[in-house]
Amino acid sequence: MYQNIGKYYIRNGKTVPSYEFELVHSDLKIIYEVIRVIDGTALFLKDHLVRLSASLEKSQMVADVDDIEKSIHRLIDMYPEYNKNIKIDVTENNYRLYFMESFYPDEDKYRQGVYVKTANIVRENPNIKRLNMDYKRHIEAIKGDAFEVLLVNKDGFVTEGSRANLVFVKDQTLFSAPLEEILVGITFKNVLSMAENKSFSIDYTSVKLEDIKKMDACFLTGTSLGILPIHQIDDHIFGSETNHVVLELRQAYNQEIKGDQ
């Protein structure tokens, strides 16, 4: 479970000492967001808040998102030295937000790409960012030495990662599962916008597991990952880390997050 790493966190708009931080019972309905902070700036903050509002509405829950936004800025001001992720947990009539210990891939993973494996798993309610500990434990049990697990639906299509979005590349075209079938990540959304600005085509068609070998490259996107090339899916090896489309998008993304600060 996620832990607060600061001396304080914010609960319902109030600053609270960390010794009062309690783990939320897993039976509760928890809507959450994870926001990356770099040099005092919450990246893509408006997008995260819009998605939070949508998840709350779909879950028939209520929270003061404007107050949450103010609390985010206050928490960042409390810890200006933290280049880490903020987590927002919303339960019925309550919210809290806190800095959490954050993992970012080292540069070798971007240069060499990562190994991922596939599993026949379908995410329940993919458009709602809701905490599901049973799902997380199941993924960890099968992940092994892989960096990530890619989800394959009942029809054999590879849709997304267990905690990241997935994009395939063929020539100048990016392939993504239909948006209604996946959790649309904030980084993913912005990367696709960058791709359109570079005149790359985007095809919202899932790739069958048996057809991944026809693709030139693939990559993961996520709050902590940015754009992370995939070197290998199961037994199939790609050259994603040297693919020109992936490299162009990585460069555009890195420039974008610098400009967002």
Image (cartoon, rainbow, N blue to C red):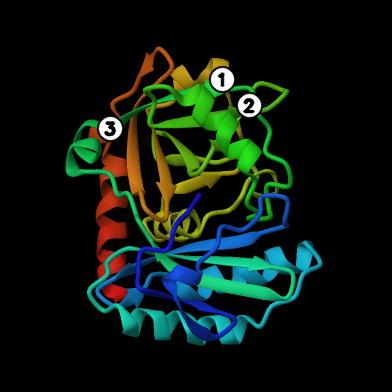
Q: In which quadrant is the C terminus drawn?
A: bottom left
Give the Cα separation between the discs numbered 3 and 1.
19 Å
Residue density around tag 1, few if under 14, some if 14–19, many if 20 or more, within 10 Å: some
Residue 258 in picture, x, y percent from top left: 25, 69
User: What kind of element bears circle 3?
Assistant: loop
Disc number placed over residue 113 in the picture, else none:
3
Q: Is residue 99 left or right of residue 206?
A: left
| Among the 4 quarters of the image, the one containing residue 187 | bottom left
Indicate the amino acid at tag 1. Answer: Leu
Residue at (72% x, 56% y) in the render: 28
In front here: 178 or 103? 103
Residue at (57% x, 34% y) in the render: 137
In front here: 85 or 254? 85
Specify which label sits upstream in the sequence, 2 or 3.
3
Q: Read off the residue under disc 2.
A: 157
Q: Is residue 33 left or right of residue 215?
A: right
Residue density around tag 2, few if under 14, some if 14–19, many if 20 or more, within 10 Å: some
Are circles 1 and 2 on residues that touch, CB within 8 Å?
yes
Residue at (47% x, 41% y) in the render: 174
Q: Is residue 70 left or right of residue 154?
A: left
Residue 223 in picture, x, y percent from top left: 41, 56
Residue density around tag 3, few if under 14, some if 14–19, many if 20 or more, within 10 Å: many
Residue 200 in view in this figure = yes
Specify which label sits upstream in the sequence, 1 or 2.
2
User: What kind of element bears circle 1?
Assistant: helix
Q: Is residue 100 left or right of residue 256?
A: right
Indicate the amino acid at tag 2. Answer: Phe
Disc number placed over residue 209 in the picture, else none:
1
Q: Compared with residue 96, is residue 152 higher up or lower down, i.e. above or below?
A: above
Front position among marks 3 and 1: 3
